[in-house]
Structure formats: C-alpha cells, structure tokens
Image: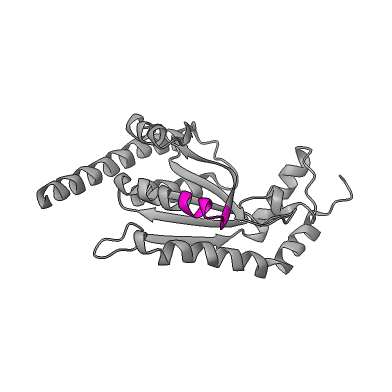
Amino acid sequence: MSDINSKDIVSFYLENQFRLEQFQASVEKFFTAHPNLNKKPLPIIHSIKTRLKDPDHLLDKLERKKNAGRVITKDNLFREITDLIGIRVLHLYHDQFPLIHSEILNYIDQGDWLFVEPPKAFTWDPESKKMYDGLGIDNEVRETYYTSVHYLIKPNNSNPNPICCEIQVRTLFEEIWGEIDHSINYPHPTDDISCREQLRVLSKLVSTGTRLADSIFRTLNDRKK
C-alpha cells in the first residue's frame, strides 16, 4: 500500500473529469427537463445543486481509506469512491417525494441507469419513516439526525471501473440543516458537544417546518377539489 501515491490518483481524477462531467450533465438534465417533475405552475423539482468532488477533499479521503487498509488505485477509483459526482434534488414538501422516487425507478426500469446499491433514506422522524417503509425504501437513523434520501447510480454498461453518481433528494428545510451540518462536520466531524446537540435540535425544527409545509399544501389541494 505504501507505494500507492494518493496525489497521483488525484491527478488521474483531474485528467478524467471530462468523463465525469458528461454523466453529471446527463443526470442533471434528467431532473431539470423531465416533464412530470417540472409541470407548471408548481414544479415538483424546486432546484438542483451539483458538484464534482473537490480534489483536496478527495486527497483527504484517499489518505483515510489507505490508513484504514483500503487500496484505492486508478483502476478502481470510480468504483470505490462513489461520491465523485453529487447531485442534490430539492423540493418543497414531503408529499412531492413519492413522484420523484417513482420517476427514478422508472428510469432504472427503462435501462438507462443501474443502482450501485438500493436507495436508502436517513430519517429520525416516525411519519417520514412510515412513508419510506410504504415505498419500500430502507431507512436508518443517524446519530446526528441527518435527513435525506440517497440514490447511488451508474450508467448501464459493462465498464469494470464505472463512474458513479450520488443523488440526494431532500426538502428545502432539510437542505438548510444539511448546509449548516456540512460547514461544521465536513470533512471531519466537530468534537464540540454543544454544536452536535444544537444540530439535533435544529433537525427537529426542520422536521416541524416540513410537516407544516405538507399541511399547507394539503389544505390548498383539498379546497381545489
């Protein structure tokens, strides 16, 4: 393992970014152009955020993997580091999520993408857990009370070192929490106990906001019937 130079792997990543950018653009286009997700006057998709992994963050991750005994090389980089491409899909309230999930599954069924692993939801909220269970999505609780749904996809081809894309779907309220948590805990978690507890409280406030948004739109839709 000692002869594997992490900086060389980062250089390889930078040299091949154009390949990642092609898949990144196609996944982003799926969400921004899909007719069922972008109907007016209120599209299901509010906005999209996308990024390629920062080279310094990748170097840090490679060193952590190496220290943990994981061998990452140019030949398995894309297969082993699955968050080089990140797409974040933001929507207003939870009742919109089942349609987003359904259209992703449809695209998988049509053979354009493959799941690298089954979708997973992260939630501590019992009402959200009930929804995810009903959709057949595995879910778990993180100690931080992180909330989001993750999809890990790759192109439907036989490449042994496939480019992967991590899709995160969450509400705007959850995005606020995620941005604050990311600024404090990434790439290394804070050891400040007070900050960790405050983030847990904020997560509960975020859940309350999302539930209220659902209630508002349910009331509005009921009155239109």
- Residue 174: x and y in percent read 38, 46
- Residue 199: x and y in percent read 41, 38
Please give left or right for residue 136 compared with residue 10 in the image: left
In the image, what residue occupies the spot 27% across and 43% down? 209
Please name whichever residue, 179 or 30, is drawn nearer the observer in this view of the structure: 30
Report the label total. 0
**Residue 58: quarter of image:** bottom right
In the image, what residue occupies the spot 19% across and 45% down? 218
Residue lying furthest right in this view? 3
- Looking at the image, is 209 positioned above or below residue 136? below
Display coloring: one colour
Picture quarter with the N terminus: top right
- Residue 158: x and y in percent read 71, 55
Taking the magenta stretch, the answer to whether it contains residue 121 is no
Residue lying furthest front in this view? 110
**Residue 194: quarter of image:** top left
Please name whichever residue, 9 or 126, is drawn nearer the observer in this view of the structure: 126
**Residue 113: quarter of image:** bottom right
Please name whichever residue, 109 or 68, is drawn nearer the observer in this view of the structure: 109
Segment tinted magenta in the rendering: 105-113
Please give left or right for residue 25 compared with residue 173 in the image: right
In the image, what residue occupies the spot 49% across and 63% down? 28
Please give left or right for residue 12 compared with residue 168 in the image: right
Please give left or right for residue 56 compared with residue 127 in the image: right
- Residue 76: x and y in percent read 76, 51
